[in-house]
Image: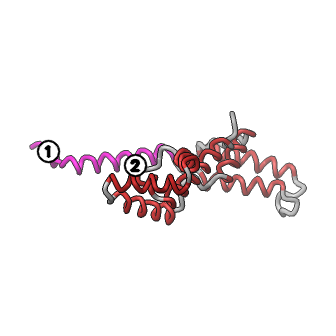
Amino acid sequence: MSFNPPILTPEEEAEVAAKAAQNVARLAAPDNTPLLALAANLRARHVDPKDIEFAGRPDRVAASELQLKALLLRAGVTEVVMTPQLLAEQQHAAAWTQTELNPAVAALVAERVAGIEKLPAREQVERAMALRAELGADDYDRLVFEAGSALPEAAKADNYALKTMAAQGRYRRAAEAAKPKP
């Protein structure tokens, strides 16, 4: 008697493959954040002059540090060595957090752009030309340039969408320019 496995549809096969990939990724990269947090807390206690166990006891600090290193080694955790470059990158990432539009603002811009996209192409072009005349050719062209390649054609006909996306483009360029150099 032979065993014939059930035949899966292509959708079921894709689902099984996706779940298998998730399991492999989860097993391949365990989250060591709690263990590293424990190590950081223990090391903070090592230098705390008011700590009951470690204050004024370099022998206990040394023994605790050895035990901590052995624990991390057994767990397969490699600690990230803090270099000036890594510190600068972390500080930059913390300072420049708004690389994407606020979801409510993005939804409003998308709604306005969708409304313009529903219009005939000729009317879209007429609105864009009217906005260009209203803002002035130089200012309009500067806003289009600052918005970058992510600017939809329909957004060129809406003052709010154009200015919002131009501001976001300026922010992204400033964040990129402020990145620490290796």
Three-letter residue code for mark 1: Phe
Q: Which residue is situated farthest in the right direction here?
A: 56
Q: Mark 1 near mark 2, Cβ–Cβ under 8 Å?
A: no
Query: Which secondary structure lies at badge 2?
Result: helix
Direction from residue 56 to residue 40 in the image, left or right: left
At label 1, counting other C-alpha atoms closer than 10 Å, the crowd grade (few under 14, some 14-19, many 20 or more) is few
User: Residue visible at 85% across and 49% down?
Assistant: 59
The residue pinned by badge 1 equals 3
Query: Which secondary structure lies at badge 1?
Result: loop
The residue pinned by badge 2 equals 22
Vertical placement of 17 versus 109: above or below?
above
Q: Position of residue 12 (x, y in %)?
A: 23, 51
> Which quadrant, please, contains the C terminus?
top right
Direction from residue 154 to residue 65 in the image, left or right: right
Region in magenta: 1-29
Q: Position of residue 31 (x, y in %)?
A: 55, 51
Direction from residue 68 to residue 18 in the image, left or right: left
Q: Position of residue 150 (x, y in %)?
A: 47, 47
Front one among 85 and 117 = 117
- Give the foreground label among 1 and 2: 2
